[in-house]
Image (tube, rainbow, N blue to C red):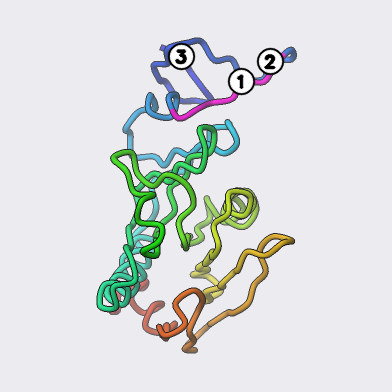
Amino acid sequence: MYRIRGIDTLFPRSLEFGMADRTILLTYRDYCELPDDGRRYEIHDGELSMTPAPNPRHQRLVGAIYRILYAHVRSRGLGEVLLSPIDVILSDIAIVQPDVVYLERSRAGAVSSRGIEGAPTLAVEILSAWTASIDRQRKRQLYARYGVPFYWIVDPDARAVEAHVLGPEGYAQVERVAGEGRAALPPLGDLVLDAGALWREGAGEG
């Protein structure tokens, strides 16, 4: 039994963090050894990231966005929509669990028995007190580096959904819908998102 940043876990080899002489990078194999204890584990460039289980508002919003995207994508045969927990294996040292993912039909082959191998078309993250800085900084960088074309950030406190599109210089915010607004967000240009209805559902009023 080894203890990694406060987590008791069984690993096939001893992993010591903070060593002066070398840096240990965790891999997908190590990720599979992590405990199933209700917390959310990810590996970001070989480093372990852990956050507590999400709160009810977060989960209501995940469910609402999933239902909206799923109905739209399925009715038009555009691909597949999946919701967390699902492993997105960007590389052997970068494994994340976006709240919702959309894969267009051309990326259908990315779905495997392990999860999603490589970049989905769209990753959606709902911010929380625990994840806001991770989602806006580290995961944004990871998604850009591994070629996720579209990234939505849902900010419940600001009551806003931001749509980011990947370009040569990284992500650029191209659309934002807030409050009671309605807007179509890329890559689903024919889906009009009703932001007001989303926040009401997040509050348990839907």
- Residue at 66 percent of width and 63 percent of height: 171
Left or right: residue 24 compared with residue 159:
right
* Amino acid on which the number 3 mark rests in the picture: Tyr
In this view, 66 is above or below 112: below
Which residue is labeled 2 in the image?
19
* Amino acid on which the number 2 mark rests in the picture: Met
Magenta segment: 22-28
Q: Secondary structure at mark 1?
A: loop
* Amino acid on which the number 1 mark rests in the picture: Ile
The magenta stretch spans residue 14 = no
> Which numbered mark, 3 or 1, is in the foreground of this view?
1
- Dot 2 or dot 1, earlier in sequence: 2
Res 164 → quadrant: bottom right
The local crowd at label 3, few if under 14, some if 14 to 19, many if 20 or more residues have their Cα within 10 Å, is some
In this view, 60 is above or below 206: above
Which residue is labeled 1 in the image?
24
Res 76 → quadrant: bottom left
Which residue is labeled 3 in the image?
2
